[in-house]
Amino acid sequence: MKIKLLFFLVLIVTTSQSILGQGCSQCKLLAEQGSGLEEASFGSNINSGILFLMVIPYLILIFLFREQIKSRLSRLFAKKG
């Protein structure tokens, strides 16, 4: 059992670099063009892209569960008030 677990762990560690190292096309394009841009604008563009990709799932969840969020917040503030 331990040998199988060790083999699986080694397999995951060795293959994760190639799987996760691809990057999105937008970030890759900005990174390749970064040498021609100013340092401040290059870092700003990469950070904006990352924030955009990070915020979208949360906005979708808030939109889908807005009624439950409203009801839970109203119950929470009604108990304290």
Image (cartoon, rainbow, N blue to C red):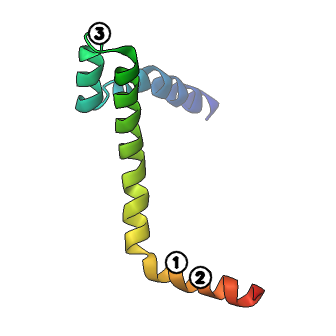
Relative horizontal placement of residue 10, taking residue 1 as reference (left or right): left
| Residue 72: assigned label | 2
Q: Residues within 10 Å of mark 2 (few under 14, many from 20)?
A: few
Q: Quadrant of the C terminus?
A: bottom right
The correct choice, above or below, for 42 with respect to 25 in the image is: above
Q: Residues within 10 Å of mark 3 (few under 14, many from 20)?
A: few
Depth check, front residue: 73 or 14: 73
SS type, badge 3: loop
| Residue 35: assigned label | 3
Q: Nearer the viewer, mark 3 or mark 2?
A: 3
Q: Nearer the viewer, mark 1 or mark 3?
A: 3
The alpha-carbon separation of the residues under discs 2 and 1 comes to 5 Å
SS type, badge 1: helix
Q: Position of residue 5 (x, y in %)?
A: 57, 32
| Snapshot quadrant of residue 21 | top left
Instruction: Tell me the amino acid under the disc marked 1.
Output: Ile
Which mark is first along the chain, 3 or 1?
3
The alpha-carbon separation of the residues under discs 3 and 2 comes to 49 Å
User: Which residue is at 42% across, 26% downward?
Assistant: 16
Depth check, front residue: 8 or 80: 80
| Snapshot quadrant of residue 27 | top left
